[in-house]
Image (tube, rainbow, N blue to C red):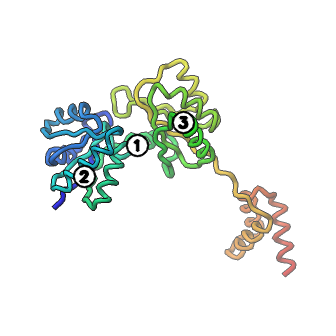
């Protein structure tokens, strides 16, 4: 009988955010797959967890992934963790989960903090619809193609960025999104020097000309303003007729359609009256 893979979330900074279930799980599994064993060892020592660690990160995931899956298939239970937060989010744990799914291995999630969700919650920007974009590529072609695709994205966007790349990323944001777009720069979340700034891209560029970026960043970017739906006069007539059938006055139907379409209210009202007179 095969074992199970546990996807275990760990704190993104404040160790008090470690859940009792996460501690219990890391104690009971047969081994732990860690992105950086040195970082995870500090966490284990803090919670007095005595367990064996195996290294599983970006550059050894192909070889180590197969070894880990083989051990689970033989009956061992494994927990996968990242350096901070939830595994699999911009993290090689994604591949390990896919390998286990392909082999029919049972997978259980032990949720914990995530930097992306924590940042969007405190950003001050819309949280109703958002998309996670992770780290931008360092290869210019891929990076610029990615940004080009997002120029008209209306949802709030979430990016991860390292401090030494922040200024270049803000410059690219200005090129593709304009300097007036709002951005929330969230750094060192849950740590001693946590800071959240909600300013324009232009203001962010000016701020970091005077202040060196420090710590890991989550960038929460305001989405593009939705363009008004392009409606023809024929479309508008159908909309107004439906409004009148539902009980609205001709005046209200024309007023509401004018807001939606950009046509003048008087023009739409005349169109509606003329149509009804022809019947």
Residue 229: image quadrant is bottom right
- Residue 109 image position (x, y, % from top left): 28, 53
Cα–Cα span, label 3 and label 1: 21 Å
Vertical position of residue 279 compared to residue 129: above or below: below
Give the residue furthest to the bottom. Answer: 279
What secondary structure is found at the residue carrying circle 1?
loop
What secondary structure is found at the residue carrying circle 3?
strand
What secondary structure is found at the residue carrying circle 2?
helix
Mark positioned earlier in the residue sequence (1 or 2): 2
Image quadrant holding the N terminus, namely: bottom left
Q: Marks 3 and 1: CB-CB under 8 Å?
A: no
Question: Which residue: 35% across, 44% down?
Answer: 92
Q: Marks 1 and 2: CB-CB under 8 Å?
A: no
Vertical position of residue 75 compared to residue 250: above or below: above
User: Is 262 or 248 nearer to us in this picture?
Assistant: 262
Crowd class of label 2 (few under 14; some 14 to 19; many from 20; radius 10 Å): many
Which residue is label 3 attached to? Answer: 183
Cα–Cα span, label 1 and label 2: 21 Å
Question: Which residue: 74% across, 73% down?
Answer: 241
Mark positioned earlier in the residue sequence (3 or 1): 1
Cα–Cα span, label 2 and label 3: 41 Å
Task: Tell me: 245 left or right of 3.
Answer: right
Which residue is label 1 attached to? Answer: 90
Which residue is label 2 attached to? Answer: 69
């Amino acid at each position: 009988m095969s074992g199970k893979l546990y996807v275990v979330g760990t704190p993104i900074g404040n160790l008090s955010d470690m859940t009792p279930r996460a501690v219990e799980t890391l104690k009971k599994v047969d081994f732990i797959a860690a992105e950086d064993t040195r970082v995870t060892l500090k966490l284990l020592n803090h919670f007095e967890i005595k367990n064996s660690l195996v290294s599983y990160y970006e550059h050894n995931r192909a070889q180590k992934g197969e070894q880990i899956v083989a051990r689970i298939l033989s009956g061992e239970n494994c927990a996968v963790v990242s350096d901070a937060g939830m595994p699999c989010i911009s993290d090689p744990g994604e591949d390990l989960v896919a390998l286990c799914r392909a082999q029919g291995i049972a997978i259980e999630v032990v949720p914990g903090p995530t930097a992306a969700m924590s940042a969007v919650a405190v950003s001050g920007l819309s949280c109703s619809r958002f998309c996670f974009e992770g780290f931008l590529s360092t290869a210019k072609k891929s990076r610029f193609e990615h940004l080009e695709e997002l120029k008209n994205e209306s949802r709030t966007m979430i990016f991860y960025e390292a401090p030494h790349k922040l200024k270049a990323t803000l410059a690219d944001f200005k090129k593709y999104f304009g300097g007036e777009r709002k951005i929330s720069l969230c750094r060192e979340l849950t740590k001693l020097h946590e800071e959240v700034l909600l300013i324009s891209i232009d203001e962010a560029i000016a701020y970091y000309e005077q202040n060196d970026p420090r710590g890991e960043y989550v960038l929460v970017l305001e989405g593009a303003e939705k363009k008004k739906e392009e409606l023809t006069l024929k479309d508008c007539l159908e909309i107004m007729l439906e409004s009148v059938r539902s009980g609205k006055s001709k005046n209200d139907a024309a007023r509401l359609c004018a807001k939606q379409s950009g046509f003048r209210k008087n023009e739409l009202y005349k169109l509606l009256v003329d149509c009804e007179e022809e019947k």
